[in-house]
Image (spheres, helix red, strand yellow):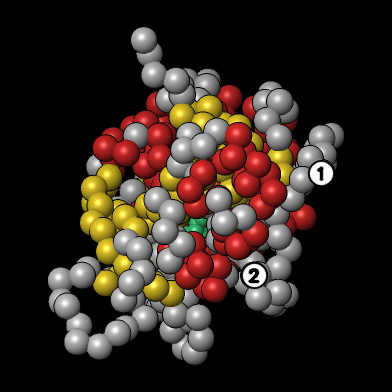
Amino acid sequence: MPEEPKKIIIDTDPGIDDAMAIFVALESPEVEVIGLTTIYGNVYTTLATRNALHLLEIAGRTDIPVAEGSHVTITKGTKLRIADFVHGTDGLGNQNFPPPKGKPIEQSAADFLIEQASCYPGKVTVVALGPLTNIALAIQSDPEFIKNIGQIVILGGAFAVNGNVNPAAEANIFGDPDAADVVFASGADVLAVGINVTHQVVLTDADREKLAMSNGRFAQYLCKILDVYYSYHHDAYSTKGVYLHDPTALLAAVNPSLVTYTEGVVRVQTIGITRGLTLFYNKQKRFGEVTEWSDKPSIKVAVTVDAPAVVNLVMERLMNS
Ligand SMILES: O=c1[nH]cnc2c1ncn2[C@@H]1O[C@H](CO)[C@@H](O)[C@H]1O
């Protein structure tokens, strides 16, 4: 008997690499996308919702519900950091696409996550591609959520490397550090895929040309929006291509053997100049005193990735769409 596809909910702030991850997910027979939930990050939440609906319309998958997420951090901070300089002011490469026809469902993202996890206990994977506010809200409002949810795969953190917002912090954790700390310390089955791993996965200029030459409809669509993402990388890094952050995390959920991981306790700095720093305790030393890491549950933190396999899968699935 073939295995039933894994149910996934993508929590997303689309975003160019989010669009790529969503399309790869829709082309992955190993998973069934049962919903998108939206969050601020690359754009504000209202625009994230609009873009999520738009991407599903492009894909002809308006059967998939979109639940709108929080407009503020869990501490109700309203001064958000929005990465429009990475993705364009519309989040999708400044293309001025027409507004979507569809609407989000009535339920909030957190309520949708809670409901789906309780409908299919242990069976739903959340792939979190933005700040972790919605997931933290679900954890805080339903004590059963961490038991009901299968796994939470997070694109976030910079483990023992510099961040991408500043030397300390990666963008998704920096977006809501308090929420990230709640999620990491919750006891849920969490796999964090940080930029220490995703910076190994590069889509080159040559790959992009191959996408452009293919007849894949998702490949064609993405080539329209990729310019802004490429020029940002060109200016900010010396890498010849773009980092596949969100598609890597998505594929780690689809096929866990693409990454290796270690286990330990992760806490997040929530104040000061290192706000958003993710600090991993490997449990090798038994400290004499009680620390802020003592008695906290371990999570999985990705260490290596089969980068060529991830790039190949992304290319194949987009070109064959
Ligand atoms: O330099 C950056 N600043 C802010 N956000 C970024 C930057 N580079 C990429 N991303 C976005 O944040 C996530 C990875 O941290 C990715 O989702 C990417 O789209």
Q: Check if mark 2's residue and mark 1's residue have beta carbons within 8 Å.
A: no
Please tell me the numbered disc located at residue 106.
Answer: 1
Disc 1 marks which amino acid?
Glu
Quarter-of-image position of residue 251: top left
Residue in the image at 82% along x and 39% along y: 103
In the displayed structure, 138 sits above or below 106; it is below
Q: The disc labelled 2 sits on which kind of residue?
A: Ile
Residue 74's mark?
2
Where is residue 180 shown, x and y percent of the image?
Answer: 50, 66
Res. 312 image quadrant: top left
Residue pictured at 31% horizontal, 76% vertical: 294
186 relative position to 258: left or right: right
The residue located at (25%, 88%) in the rendering is 289
Q: Is residue 245 left or right of residue 145?
A: left
How would you rate the neighbour count of disc 2 (Cα within 10 Å): few for under 14, some for 14-19, many for 20 or more? many
Is residue 87 depicted above or below 107 in this figure?
below
Q: CA distance from mark 2 to mark 1?
A: 20 Å
Q: Circle 2 sits in a helix, a strand or a loop, which is it?
A: loop
Q: Quadrant of the N terminus?
A: top left
Determine whether the residue tagged by mark 1 lies in a helix, strand or loop: loop
